[in-house]
Image: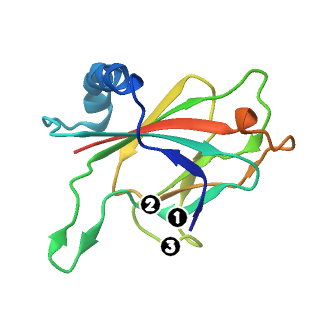
Amino acid sequence: MRRSSKLKDLGELKDELRARARTALPAMFDRLATRFEPSKFELEMVAHGDGAFYTRHRDTKTGDSGLINRRLISAVYYFHRSPKSFSGGALRIYAFEGTKETGAFVDIEPTNDTLVFFPSWFPHEVLPVVCPSGRFEDSRFAICWVHR
């Protein structure tokens, strides 16, 4: 389902990233036509090296008893080394309806210093990454935060 490296403990960066996420909220709310007071910011850094991917999934999980988590907005901040040393790794966001084979989608390239956000219940995936050097520092990096 997923091949990547993840770091959940961001140490001293956590407070700065949380503050920046809070600063980005008004723009996210305006674009997504929603408003709420987040009770939590989840932060993690993800590295996608050679051969990495994340198959189609949703960030909001449901079960027999209803909502398992309260993720409402998924946000991804992309950064990478310059010049870019990998190809692929686009974020594919699918239309809410339809299957992987029949649904419409949009591919968003992981462009350095770019913030992408979308409703957490939209199906999405990370397309395979090609990183010829295989070096960690040449990977596709993202800092993800999900608002609850």
Residue 123: x and y in percent read 44, 60
Occupied quadrant, residue 142:
top right
From this view, report whether residue 99 is shown above or below residue 71: below
The x and y percentages for residue 37 are: 13, 34
Quadrant of the rendered image containing residue 112: top right
| Spot occupied by residue 7 in the image (x, y as percentages of width and height) | 49, 43
Q: In the rendered image of this protein, does residue 26 appear above or below residue 8? A: above
Say which amino acid is labelled 1.
Answer: Arg
Mark 1, residue position: 56
The tag earlier along the polypeptide, 1 or 3, is: 1
| Residue under label 2 | 123
Numbered circle sitting on residue 38: none
Q: CA distance from mark 1 to mark 3?
A: 10 Å
Judge left or right: residue 25 versus residue 39. right
Gap between marks 1 and 2, in whole Å? 6 Å
**Tag 1 and tag 2, C-beta contact below 8 Å:** yes
- What amino acid type should be assigned to the residue bearing mark 3? Thr
- The amino acid marked with disc number 2 is Pro
In-image side of 38 versus 43 (left or right): left
Residue 99: assigned label: 3
Please give left or right for residue 128 compared with residue 38 in the image.
Answer: right
Q: Earlier in the sequence, mark 1 or mark 2?
A: 1
Location of residue 10 (image quadrant): top left
Chain-order first, disc 2 or disc 3: 3
In screen coordinates, is 76 left or right of 74?
A: right
Q: Nearer the viewer, residue 81 or 74?
A: 81
